[in-house]
Every structure is written in C-alpha cells, then in structure tokens.
Amino acid sequence: MKYIHLIISIVLLSMLVACGGSSENPEQETSTEQDTSPAPFSFAAISAAELNTTVTSETVTITGINTATNVSIVGGSFAIDGGDFTNSASTISNQQTLQVQLVTAPTNNTETVATVTVGDVNVKFTVTTKEAPASAQPTIIPAPTGTRTVDINYNVRHSVGGIDSFDRQKFITIHSENTEHDWFDNDQFSRNAANEQDDLITHFLDGYDVYLGRSTGGITWHLNQILEDPARPGFVSESDATSRANGAKWSYNNLPERKQSAYNHEDRAVDMIVGAQQHPFWPEGTLTKGSGWALSQTNTTEEPLGTATGHYMAQYFSKFFDATPNDGIRNGQIKPKYVEVMNEPLYDLTTVRDGADRVEPADVFRFHNTVANEIRKNNDDVLIGGYTTAFPDFDKDDFQRWFDRDKQFIDIAGENMDFYSIHLYDFPTFKNSERYRRGSNVEATMDMLESYSLRAFGETRPLVISEYGAQVHDHIGQGWTPIRNTHSIRATNSMLMQFMERPDMILKTIPFIVVKAEWGRNNGVPYGPRLMIQKFERDGEGAGDEWVYSDLVLFYQLWSDVKGTRIDTKANDLDIQTDAYIDGNTAYIILNSLEFDETDVALNHLGLGNNTITSVTIDHLTTKQDGTSGSVIETTTYNELPSTVELDAEATMIIKVEFGDDLSIDQSLTESKYYSDAHIEDINKDEAITVNINNVSVPSQGEAVLRLAVGRTHSLSLTPYVEINGHAIAIPEDFRGYDQKQGRTKSGRDNFYGVIEVPVPLEHLSQSNEITITFDDDGGKLASAALQVFESSIVLNRFTTN
C-alpha cells in the first residue's frame, strides 16, 4: 500500500512542476546578470620623468564588463578610445580602450599618482621625476625678448599695508621751503636778476601740484646767532633763544609784500624735514660764526656727548615755530614734522678723515641717541631719525661697511629712531664708470634695512629718503648742461617708481632738486641740480640774465596730473616698471624703462566692462642720447586705447585715458611682505643656505615673489638652486635694472649687490616655510630674504608669452 502512495506523490509533484506551480520566476532564472567589475588591468609605472611635464600611460583595453560602467579619476585625466582627455566622470563599455595622463612634480625624485576607478576597481598610474644631479641646477626663466607685455586690471584695487592711493605730498616734492629766498627775485639771492615767470612759487607749486620738502639752512643760521648761556658754558642761552624765536616769528608774520605769496603755500609745507649739519653741531670745538662760541664737548654719564646739541635743537623746534597752527592765527612758520639729527655725518667725520681726527661711527650713533632724547624733552610732536647716510654701500668690502656703519647704527640707535633717513644717488659718470643704484640695488638696500630692524628689535622702521637722484661727477665745475639734467631725470623717475611700490614703508621722498642755490656757487660756477637757470646759461651770452626753468621742470610737468586709487599692473619684464591710478573717469598708466635701448611694450587692457573711451593722451619723457639736445616731453593723442607703445631707453611715459563713465574698481589685490631670519649668510659652493619665513597668510588665489638680496663678484652665478618646502623653484635669468657689470658704454659697479625677484606658485607655500638656496660656486653673501604675497579677490589674467 505504501508503494501506491509513493507513486501517486511522484505523479502529483510532476504535474505541479509542469503546471508552473513552482514559486521561482522562470524569466529570472534564464536572464544574464549585469557585471561592472572589469577584468584585472594595470598601468606600468614610469620613472626618471622630466619635471613639471605631462606624461601619458600606455593604452589598456577594458574587458570583463557587460554594461556601461562608471569611470572617474583623481590626480589626473583619462581618455576613452583615443578621445580627449578629461577629469570629469564618464562611462566605459567592454572592449573600449583607456589611457591616463598626469603632470609630473616640479621637484626631483618626486612621485605623482593618478588613480582611475572603473566600476569598483581602483588602479594607479605612478610617475616619478628624475633624480637631481649631483649638484642641483636651477630651472632658468629666460629674460624676455622682443615686445614686452604689461597687464592693466582697471577693476582691481592694489593696496599695500592699507594704502591704496597716490600721495603727492609724499612723492612729488622739491628740496625747498616756502620762505626760501630763491623763489623771489631781484635781490642778492637771485644775482639781482628777475624771474621770467611772475610769482614763481605759485606758478610752480600750484601749476604742477608740488609739495615742499626739506631745509637745512635755518636751523644752522640761528645757532650761529644765538648767545651762549653764561651760567652753562657750551649751551645756548634759553632766554636768548626765546628772544630770537620771537623775532623769527615776527619776521615771518610780516614778510615784505613781494614775498607774501609764501603764505599761500603753507598747506604744502605741513610735513617738512629739517636737518642739522656737521658744523657747528658736531661738538669738536667749531665756533659759531655769529657769536663765536662752541657747543659743549663734555661726554659723561650725566652729560653724554651731544647733550648741548640736542638742547639747542629742542629749543629751536619748541620755540621758533607756530605752536598752534590750526587756531587760525599765524604765529610763525608751521613746525616741521621730521627731524634728521645730522645730514650725512660719516662722510665728513669718518670717511675723509684719518688718525686722531677720525670719528668712530659708534660715537656718532650714540650722539644720535643723546640728541633725540634731548629734543623729545620739549617736542612730542616731531619724528626723529637718522643717520641720513650719504652712500649706503652695504656690500662694500664684502659687507664690512654694513657691519661697521649701518648695522651698528641700528644696534645702537635704531630702536630710538622714529625713521631711518637715507640718500640714494646714481653715479652715471663716476671715474669712467656707470654706477647705478636704480633697479635691483635700491631694492636690496631698502630690504636690508627693513629686514635687519625686524631681526634686531622686532619692528621695521619707515624710511625718509630726503635726497635722491644723480650725481654727475664728470660735469662738476662745468656749469649747467642739458645732459646734467638728463641724468637727474632718468634717475629720479626710475627711483620714484620703486619708492611708490612701498607706500606703507616710506614717509617722504625728496628728489635733490633745489631752486637756484646761489649758496652753492663755487668759484663762479653755479650749483648742479637746479630748477632755475639763467637764460644765458641755456642760450648763450646776450640772451639775458632772467631766471628760467631748467629741463628739470619736465619731471614735474610729466607727473603734474597723476592722482587717484592704485590699480593692479604687472610687466613680464622687471626692466619695465609700471604703475597705474584711477581718478573717477580718468586712468593714469605709468611706464618706466630701465633698459638702455628702446623697446615696444604691449598693453593688455582688462576689467573695463562696457566703458567707452573719450580720449587718450600719451606724455613720453624721452631722454635723448646725444647729450646735447637734452630731454623733452613728446605728446600724442588717440581716440582709442593703444595696444602697443614704443618706450624710449631710460624713458618714462604716462598714458592718460579718459572714459565716458567713472571706472568701477570692484576687485582687490592686497600685498603683504614677510621677512626671513637670514642675515649676511656666507655662500659656499653646493652648500644649501636654509632660511625660514613663518607666519605667512597664504591666500587661496593670488601671487607670490621670493626676494633674495645677494652680493657677489661679477664672475659668480646669480641663479641659485632654490627649494621652498621641498619644491624646486624656477629662477629668472633677468632682474631689475642693469647687470651692474656693464653700463650703457662704460663699466659698472665693482660687484653685484641687488635683489633677485623669484615668482613662487602659491601651492608651494604654507604658514611656515623652509627655503634652501644653493649656489654652484664659492663667494659672496646672501644678505636678506623676503616673501611678497599678493592676495587677489579674482583670478588675475596674466601675460603668457614673452
């Protein structure tokens, strides 16, 4: 019976299966499952690849998938079936080909990895750059050739230390004061000759928008007249100082009618510089010319050397000027803002003296402290500085000059000074050589002062450049010539462009241009850099003796209109210095050439939107090369923006562009500077100098420049191998200005001392930065190292070709 039941069960089960009584879906059982996991594949690693180069893998065929499969990449790009490379996600099908591409590292022996993902499989493509040579060689950025390029971002405000506008009071100045006799005519100070221009002081100051700068005469004249204190030998009589101060203020309040236009220009003399001279201020027994006594030479703890000098200067500044200039009542001249303890002391007291007469620099620097302390007892409203160096040749004698003088000044007196005062001159005709400071040398000089102050006492000191320009030694004793003025104009324009790059660190600059300077006439030969000359000096005997402008007025004519908000400009060649300002609907684009040959400059006008041009005026101050025709401003006008201009050798051009509407400056470029701990580091062959620049705020977009101040003989390399945080940095072959070895026609400086400006990719920077600098030869010094960082609110368009 049980067998019958078994047979019946088997038959029933067969029937259920045949009728589809199973719970399984027959369609699912017979379908093919989707497969997005590819068969194993790989890319061969590559080694010894070139730096910063695009490298492509071999081609692989993807198999083992039966449907379109996702593909993506990190660290590179990929191409399917030989198509375009992309880093955007896509899909790939069975039997299609795949390649991977990446850019190698900019440093030697560095691995770069691109990881491609197909479905659920990750595969790496690895490329390692070549080993560094035994002595690492820098990648050199060649100097630009052919047409130079300047980018002008009209909508990008450029600020440095919070300053974003052109300060004419700081930069467009003359070495004079409003009461100087030279402004007026027909007296002994003008050789009893008339000024061709009526009311000269007004025509010049107002006509060219010039500010007054510096005086060293009045403080000396009054010291020579004041009586000695009978109860305190070697010190001025305070009562006599008060009496003479009241007389001086009365005289100013009651100027003769022909000089009363001086009152109209008091607003141009609100930040004057006054400096003392060596004689009779340096206490060594020199008698005052009027009253015949000498300042005290006592040097004790109670009365350090210079106490009497400082006492007089304190009396002078507290008594001889209007103490309340804003009360609406005139009571003497406006008080100076800046005090230089002594003008160029070391040249006369140290450089040209020998033996017992030679004064040690340290004594002069302690004298600065004493004088400053005395002045401050009666004057808390002036800024005091020094040491007003004549020739800041820091690199002289392998930087021994720096250690003996300028470093020692900062160590002894720097913290007690409100500013450092220096004089900067080109020597274009010195001992059959051309020794220019403009360019990289000026940069190194200013960087050094800022850098060492930070190192010495944790703060920088601003600069007062109370004289700058050119000294033309070959023309001394020859009277006025056009080429004299040409040399001065070239130097003044170029250095001014450099000073304008540091508006936060410079308090005032004064080109050494004086008015008539009859006080400087020597054996009948007039003084050198004069604003005014007599007609016969230019046109020959018989032309008349009226006072007329020399060619130096062209400097002021060229700059007369410039004002406004600073905007971003950048040249692809450091020898083309550039700046620009916006004032409402007017732009002023400034180009200055440090080249000895004329050059074409292409202009990239960016960020203008739909604004229309109404007029373009180009003033080109060319300095002719023949030495006889002098300098001239060539003016041309256009109805549209020029794309290229021709800039003469050592010339300056200002392009004034007027638009239909005010320009919108809605983006920003903020510049900061950070200094390293480096200070006069010896350069030894193949030995890395390691410096650190810390606390850097690295922006998400912008630019950076490493500044290396180097002093080396001309036979040595100026292109070191540099790494920042392990990344090799390409070094430019060119730098600002000439190579300092060869001038236009004559030899240059004895050695190179200047800043090498090195572009640095932002991605190589961090808050704390280790920098190594390696030269392949021995000798010289790394004087300082700094980092400029520019944070931009937008990605800046920059030139891409030389």
Image (spheres, helix red, strand yellow):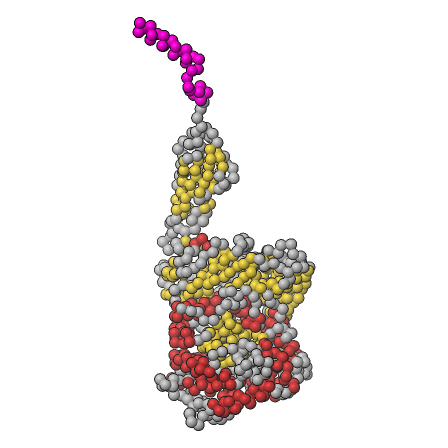
- Which quarter of the picture shows residue 138? bottom left
Is residue 337 depicted above or below 104 in this figure? below
Q: Residue at x 67, y 80 (%)?
A: 198
Query: Which quadrant of the figure has residue 638?
Result: bottom right
- Which is more toward the observer, 310 or 13? 13
Q: Going 43% across and 47% down the picture, which residue do you hit?
A: 104
Image vertical order of residue 218 relative to residue 22, above or below: below
Query: Which quadrant of the structure image shows residue 512?
Result: bottom right
Measured as percent of width and height from the top left, residue 140 is found at 46, 56
Q: In this picture, is 796 found above or below 314?
A: above
**Quadrant of image for the N terminus:** top left
- Give the main secondary structure, helix, strand or loop, of the magenta stretch: helix
Task: Report if residue 519 lies within the magenta region.
Answer: no
* Residue span colored magenta: 1-30
722 or 646, which lies in front?
A: 722
Q: Position of residue 50 (x, y in %)?
A: 43, 48
> Residue drawn 47% across and 71% down?
462
**Side of 703 relative to 253 (left or right):** left
The single residue placed furthest to the left in the displayed view is 2
The residue lying furthest to the bottom in this view is: 230
* Residue 168, horizontal then vertical, whole percent: 58, 71
Residue 429 percent across, percent down from the top left: 52, 74
Farthest-out residue, front: 1
Residue 167 appears in the figure: yes
Point out the image quarter for the C terminus.
Answer: bottom right
Taking the spot 55% from the left edge, 74% from the top edge, the residue there is 511
Q: Is residue 707 visible?
A: no
Magenta-colored stretch includes residue 9: yes
